[in-house]
C-alpha cells in the first residue's frame, strides 16, 4: 500500500517539526506514496501529538495550505516582544473581533498569534473574560507556547511561563483602568 521514504521533499524532511496553520506544531513522521483513484501521490505524514491527530498532506499542496518551517529565533524574540506591548482592542462588536482573532490564530503566523495573546490576556486583578474570550486566549496561548517550545527546546509549561513572564512586563498589567484613573487624578 504505502512505501516509507526517509527523504526530503520541498525543503521539508522527516523528523522535522513544522507549523500547519489549522493545527499548530506537528512532526513530519514520514513521506509516503499512496495510490488514490489510480494516481500516485506523495504525502507528508504529520503527527500532532497534542490533538492525537495524524494528517496526510500531499507534497503538492503544502504551499496552498500554508505549511511552514518553525519560526527563526529572531521571530520568536519579536513575538515575545509583541506580547509586552499595550493591548490593541478595537471598538467593534465582540463577534467581529472574535472572527478576526480566530483568523489570526489559524493563519499560523507567530506574530499574529502573539497579538491575540497580548490583546486577550487578563492579569489576576483585571475583570474576568467571557467564556469565548477565554477559549480564544487559551487557543492562541497553546499555539504560541508549542512553537516557542519547539524552537527553544522547552517543555510546553516552560514556554507558557516564558510568555506569561513577558505578558507581565506590558503596560497597564497588574492594574485596572479605574486604578490608573484614580492615580492620575491624585
Image: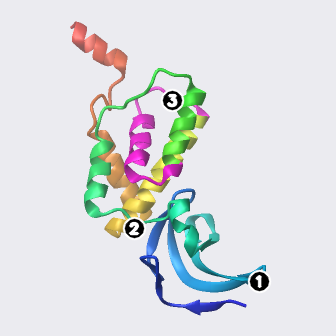
Residue 125 is situated, as x and y percent measured from the top left of the image, at: 40, 29
Classify 10 Å Cα crowding around label 3: few (below 14), some (14-19), many (20 and above).
few
Mark 3–mark 2 CB contact (< 8 Å): no
Q: Is residue 97 above or below residue 166?
A: above
Residue 109 is situated, as x and y percent measured from the top left of the image, at: 43, 52
* Render colour scheme: rainbow
Instruction: Name the residue at the top extreme.
Output: 185
Q: Nearer the viewer, mark 3 or mark 2?
A: 2
Instruction: Determine the secondary structure under disc 2.
Output: helix
Residue at point 32%, 26% (across, down): 175
Task: Write down the region rendered in magenta.
Answer: 106-131
The residue to which callout 1 is attached is: 38
Q: In 3D space, how far apart are the residues under numbered discs 1 and 3 (Cα atoms)?
A: 55 Å
State which quarter of the image contains the C terminus. top left
Q: In 3D space, how far apart are the residues under numbered discs 3 and 2 (Cα atoms)?
A: 31 Å
Q: Nearer the viewer, mark 1 or mark 3?
A: 1
The residue to which callout 2 is attached is: 150
Residue 148 location, quadrant: bottom left
Q: Is residue 117 above or below residue 23?
A: above
Instruction: Determine the secondary structure under disc 3.
Output: loop
The residue to which callout 3 is attached is: 128
Instruction: Name the residue at the front extreme.
Output: 39
Residue 60 is situated, as x and y percent measured from the top left of the image, at: 56, 72
State which quarter of the image contains the N terminus. bottom right
Residue at point 41%, 45% (across, down): 112
Instruction: Determine the secondary structure under disc 1.
Output: loop
Q: Give whichever of 132, 37 is nearer the camera.
A: 37
Say whether residue 3 is visible.
yes
Amino acid at each position: 500500500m504505502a512505501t516509507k521514504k526517509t527523504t526530503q521533499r520541498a525543503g521539508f524532511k522527516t523528523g522535522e517539526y513544522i507549523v500547519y496553520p489549522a493545527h499548530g506544531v506537528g512532526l513530519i513522521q514520514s513521506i509516503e506514496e499512496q495510490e488514490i483513484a489510480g494516481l500516485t501521490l506523495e504525502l507528508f505524514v504529520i503527527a500532532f501529538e497534542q490533538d492525537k491527530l495524524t494528517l496526510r498532506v500531499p507534497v503538492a499542496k503544502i504551499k496552498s495550505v500554508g505549511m511552514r518551517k518553525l519560526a527563526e529565533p529572531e521571530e520568536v524574540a519579536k513575538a515575545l516582544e509583541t506580547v509586552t506591548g499595550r493591548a490593541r482592542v478595537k471598538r467593534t462588536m465582540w463577534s467581529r473581533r472574535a472572527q478576526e482573532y480566530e483568523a489570526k490564530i489559524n493563519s499560523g503566523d507567530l506574530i499574529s498569534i502573539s497579538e491575540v495573546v497580548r490583546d486577550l490576556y487578563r492579569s489576576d486583578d483585571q475583570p474576568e473574560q467571557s467564556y469565548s474570550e477565554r477559549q480564544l486566549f487559551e487557543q492562541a496561548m497553546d499555539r504560541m507556547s508549542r512553537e516557542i517550545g519547539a524552537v527553544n527546546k522547552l517543555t510546553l509549561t516552560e514556554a507558557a511561563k516564558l510568555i506569561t513572564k513577558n505578558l507581565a512586563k506590558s503596560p497597564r498589567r497588574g492594574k485596572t483602568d479605574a486604578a490608573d484613573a484614580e492615580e492620575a487624578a491624585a
